Amino acid sequence: MLNPIHLRTLRECVGTGSFAEAARNLGYTSSAVSQQMFLLERAIGAPLFERSARSVRATAVAALLAERSAAVLAALTTLEREARAMVAGEAGTLRLASFATANARVVPAALADVVSRRPGAEVHLDEGEPDDVLGGVRSGALDAAVVFDYDLAPKDWPVELTRTELLAEPFLLAVPTEHRLAGRTEVDLAECRGETWICTNPDTAGARSLARLASEAGFQPRIIFRSNDYTVIRDLVSRGLGVAMLPGLAWPDGGVARVRLAGRAPHRFVLALHRPNNTNPLLPLALDCLARACAEYAEDQGGWG
């Protein structure tokens, strides 16, 4: 394979008609230029210059190589520039996945921040529950996944993945705005013994967390509505059909009153999972932008009170 450095030198020699002038233009010594042309001639198997004491004259083969190598050298220059941009994190592709409520509240701001700081980057986002996206992180199809974990129903994460905590969402009581508890800032869960409950499906961490909280308060919740879509749960609560426990990112902008639990501060944690040996230079930037977006959202919620 022809050496691109030798081809660049050849083009300069053909253009100037002089090894000495080509050397000055390229920052080489004349002997270095002569040696490069000797090596190129050996690789081609034919002489490239008619040499005299004061000048060199390109052969037809040299003229052809000089002309045809221009596009090749330009492509190599572009490739080198693109590779350096990827290494510097100025370009490249970032592949993330996240769950629905994070995608609705914090992920868009984080991704917009990434793109504004690295306009040359291409960002992909998939949506799925933690169990649905873990395989992509482990296989390398995803650079990172934003997942959740309830402290009352913790999950065993793969030990080979690095976990970065982004947010601790409080688990708060959601009641209709006209409910008897709507004006309270804090409530003992035992006061909700006779309430109708709205909850996620039985196999979810949210449902297991509610069952544990209610058990500690001395009752079993009477659940008559179930949905894994927090938008549905919020709408049911807002229409007076029951009460619910919601994590912070699931809170609506209005229509539902939120009340803290007395003596208990259950949380859902938002985490970013990634492989520790992932060398994508865009990943640290993405983690920083996600942490910023989560912190800003929590601040906007006034401490989740």
Image (cartoon, helix red, strand yellow):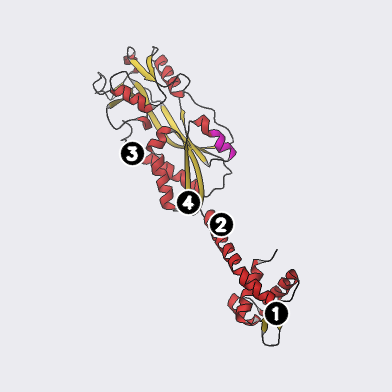
Residue for badge 1: 49
Nearest to N terminus: mark 2 or mark 3: 2
Residue for badge 4: 121
Residue for badge 2: 83
- Looking at the picture, does residue 263 appear above or below residue 60? above
Q: Position of residue 136 (x, y in %)?
A: 55, 37
Mark 3 residue type:
Glu
- Looking at the picture, does residue 102 appear above or below residue 56? above
Q: CA distance from mark 4 to mark 2?
A: 13 Å
Q: Nearer the viewer, mark 4 or mark 3?
A: 4
Q: Which mark is residue 299?
A: 3
Mark 2 residue type:
Ala
Q: CA distance from mark 2 to mark 3?
A: 39 Å
Q: Nearer the viewer, mark 3 or mark 1?
A: 1
- Looking at the picture, does residue 83 appear above or below residue 130? below
Nearest to N terminus: mark 4 or mark 2: 2
